């Protein structure tokens, strides 16, 4: 498991324990985005470890790398979107005093996951972004 996957998973678990999670559309959507990011990162991990890199030909390596670039980029996009949704929730509803610690942990974990994703797969995301921009 990647550290970014663990960060998203931690944030998601804390969000699910947040009091308004079941009743607020913004929190539900943020949870969905976090779930998407988590699943994408898990898929990337499985793909990476399912191939014999030394014995694979160049075409296979190229195809797998392209697939993993897309997965990392999409996971990063989901993390950012989850952050935007959480920001909107905070701006619109605020957080009760007794929920502040849990909220802070949700945000910290998500920020850490995004930072770790950039550290681990920054080049993959940049390559994917360049192909989208062209």
Image: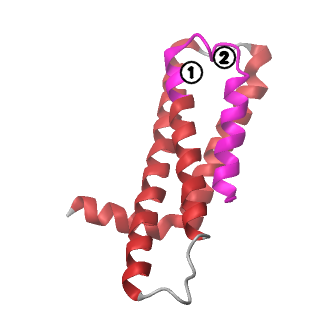
Residue pointed to by mark 2: 95
State whether the magenta stretch is mostly helix, strand or loop: helix
Whole-percent x and y of residue 4? Answer: 64, 54
Could you tell me if the residues under marks 2 and 1 are in contact, i.e. CB atoms within 8 Å?
yes
Whole-percent x and y of residue 81? Answer: 46, 37
C-alpha gap between disc 2 and disc 1: 7 Å
Per the image, label 2 sits on a secondary structure element best described as loop
Q: Quadrant of residue 70?
A: bottom left
Q: Which mark is residue 44?
A: none
Q: Nearer the viewer, residue 112 or 48?
A: 48
Q: Is residue 80 left or right of residue 34?
A: left
Q: How did the renderer colour the structure?
A: secondary structure
Q: Is residue 44 above or below residue 50?
A: above
Residue at 76% x, 15% y: name it: 97
Q: Residue furthest top?
A: 23
Q: Is residue 103 above or below residue 70?
A: above
Asked if the stretch drawn in magenta spans residue 26, the answer is yes
Per the image, label 1 sits on a secondary structure element best described as helix
Whole-percent x and y of residue 17? Answer: 73, 22
Residue at 80% x, 15% y: name it: 98
Q: Earlier in the sequence, mark 2 or mark 1?
A: 1
Whole-percent x and y of residue 54? Answer: 56, 89
Q: Nearer the viewer, residue 120 or 65?
A: 65
- In this picture, which residue range is highlighted in magenta? 1-30
Q: Is residue 4 above or below residue 36?
A: below
Residue pointed to by mark 1: 90
Asked if the stretch drawn in magenta spans residue 4, the answer is yes
Task: Report the quarter where the C terminus lies.
Answer: bottom left
């Amino acid at each position: 498991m990647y550290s970014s996957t663990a960060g998203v998973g931690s944030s998601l678990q804390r969000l699910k324990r947040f009091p308004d999670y079941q009743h607020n559309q913004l929190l539900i959507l943020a949870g969905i985005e976090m779930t998407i990011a988590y699943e994408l990162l898990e898929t990337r991990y499985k793909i990476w470890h399912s191939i014999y890199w030394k014995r694979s030909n160049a075409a296979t390596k190229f195809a797998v790398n392209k697939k993993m670039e897309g997965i990392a980029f999409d996971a990063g996009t989901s993390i950012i979107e989850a952050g935007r949704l959480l920001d909107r929730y905070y701006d619109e509803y605020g957080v009760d005093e007794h929920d502040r610690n849990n909220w802070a942990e949700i945000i910290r974990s998500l920020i850490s996951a995004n930072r770790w994703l950039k550290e681990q797969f920054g080049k993959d995301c940049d390559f994917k972004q360049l192909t989208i921009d062209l």
